[in-house]
Amino acid sequence: MATVSRVLNGTAVVKDETKAKVQAAIEKLAYRPNAVARGLASKRTKTIGVILPDVSDLFHAEVLRGIEDIATMYQYHIILTNSDAREDREIDLIGTMWEKQVDGMIFISEKITKEIVRTFEQAQLPVVLCATDDPEGRIPSVAIDNESAAYDATRFFLEKGTSQIVFFGGPTTHPVTMERRRGYERALQEAGKPLQNDLILHAPDMKYEGAHGVAAEFLQNGHRAEAVVAASDEIALGFLNAVRDRGGNSPQDVLLLGFDNTRLSTIVRPELTTVAQPTYDLGAVSMRLLTKLLLDEPIEDYTVRLPHSIIERTSTHRG
Amino acid sequence: MATVSRVLNGTAVVKDETKAKVQAAIEKLAYRPNAVARGLASKRTKTIGVILPDVSDLFHAEVLRGIEDIATMYQYHIILTNSDAREDREIDLIGTMWEKQVDGMIFISEKITKEIVRTFEQAQLPVVLCATDDPEGRIPSVAIDNESAAYDATRFFLEKGTSQIVFFGGPTTHPVTMERRRGYERALQEAGKPLQNDLILHAPDMKYEGAHGVAAEFLQNGHRAEAVVAASDEIALGFLNAVRDRGGNSPQDVLLLGFDNTRLSTIVRPELTTVAQPTYDLGAVSMRLLTKLLLDEPIEDYTVRLPHSIIERTSTHRG
DNA sequence: TTGAAAGCGCTAACAA
DNA sequence: TTGTTAGCGCTTTCAA
């Protein structure tokens, strides 16, 4: 049994001859090691827990795919759970992940609270935050620099000489939205433009439906916008369709810039200019960082900021 | 220890007084049972394996969400892996799921081969096929009736008096595509219409990009279509944009009907008429069926067919 | 109603 | 280089 274990795991030198015999026996009996027993004995399950708000969200699904691919590469398995971004569920789930003896975790959420940080620290679980960060910087994280991404997006319009630039974010309780809003505000201030509160819109979430309603109301009230910096592609499309509902269109009547470069942005017409987050990479890099943590490899940065870029398409292009 | 186990699992009667003492101790020590040890001892891990082609695909992500919600409800966890619909990987993954001692599996694939059926039977793992079925009907499955869904979609156009109805599917190796094609053909035959092979299109996959190319070529070659029955929303949008690229639009120049009722269908303009698969339910019902299998509950049907419906939107509506 | 004891199928020291 | 032994932290008989 011990020698079989050695052959299987390569944890010690085994004579070629015996190794061959063991492998023959494994073949013959179609033997497959029991990962649960192995996990109990070795205290490593080769399993990592992933908690995210909602897999059926395009962005999360793509991040997850990145996580999974790298996990597979390093022979880890993924236990997945949806939290619906509810803190109580998140904390509960961290506990069950602990019970499952996951080797580490990747955590995606909208907001990293002190309570969550504390729970991770108590659980002593290696964890990497993905697409968000811990404001206190105590937990390793992989994300983009949202403030400067929104700053760049706003500059993009300012350099075209556009005024009446709307910022259209998610809820004000959403830290990522607020970071982006700060970038927008900084760009305007640096350009000497006044901040107009009526040009700052917040949708109930990052989805299409709510954004569509908010945009419709905005236009209904007689407001006008020359350009929109939206915090997600879906939000941008919510604005687009509100404009269309009133007989307008983009880019003729409004220039639109989304966020995330989801598949939507090329499927829709006009194709959407967007700030590309390296969605897949966000997941892949998070998982890679986690493997470094788990394998005690040297780590340069515990806080990784991936580059973003603006992808120009027709929604901001006036023929 | 044994009594603690009894309190935790409710497997035997424990005096209220001792139960209270145990619970107090659990509280005090912040004790959390080790699920791995529990799994080894009881031979049940409360974990189910999910193998699907690609989580980052909208349809699968939504099915997965359905699976996960019901799994949570029954206190199961999900181990997730992507197979990219490659049979060799699928077979390999079934093996690793076995090693992980999952209690059961949900399997989503494009094609259920004999090899896969054999692997499941050898592994003796309870499994439910989701969104596909085993042609031999030996494995429980939850899906819709693709043939009659496409039949209904085609009838929908025939009843409008439409001719030149294109069928636009995925690859010919894709069983679901072929089932739908058969439904399309049956509807035409019953209506006494000739089958025109040049009106049957196959995209390289169910995604937008490839479909867009195939549609562009179709139109380039001077073919015309009055209506399109597409095998996925993305394929329908591929056709739509090919039409638009040539200055046309829907519903004016072509009536479009997609499949799946993904978020895309309402975000896009014109909003897309589509055959709604109960995507979330496909996952939820599969998982529920699996729990019945695992808990030895009575089962009426091992082969569940969920209802589909046509959701009419602007892409088939001529003012 | 509870405690004692065996054992789930491995890994990891320790000898040999 | 290999076999022996002792657990890993639970569940599940079996007695008491």
Image (cartoon, coloured by chain):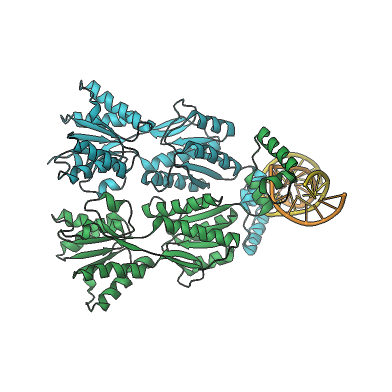
Chain colours: A cyan, B green, C yellow, D orange
Residue A47 in picture, x, y percent from top left? 55, 45
A178 to the left or right of B7: left
Residue A275 in picture, x, y percent from top left? 29, 37
A56 to the left or right of B190: right
Residue A166 in picture, x, y percent from top left? 23, 32
Residue drawn 49% across the image and 45% down it: A81
User: Between residues A9 and A159, which one lies in front from this camera angle?
Assistant: A159
The answer, for residue B54, to whether it is visible in the render is no
User: Between residues A22 and B185, which one lies in front from this camera angle?
Assistant: B185
Q: Is residue A254 above or below residue B162?
A: above
- Dividing the picture into quadrants, the one containing residue B184 is bottom left
Residue B91 in picture, x, y percent from top left? 51, 61
View extreme (front): residue: B16
B89 to the left or right of B103: left
Residue drawn 31% across the image and 29% down it: A181
Please give the count of numbered marks on the rendered protein. Answer: 0
- Dividing the picture into quadrants, the one containing residue B143 is bottom left
User: Between residues A3 and B267, which one lies in front from this camera angle?
Assistant: B267
User: Between residues A172 and B183, which one lies in front from this camera angle?
Assistant: A172
- Dividing the picture into quadrants, the one containing residue B262 is bottom left
The answer, for residue B49, to whether it is visible in the render is yes
Residue drawn 41% across the image and 51% down it: B61
Residue drawn 62% across the image and 57% down it: A32
Classify the position of the C terminus of chain A by image quarter.
Answer: top left
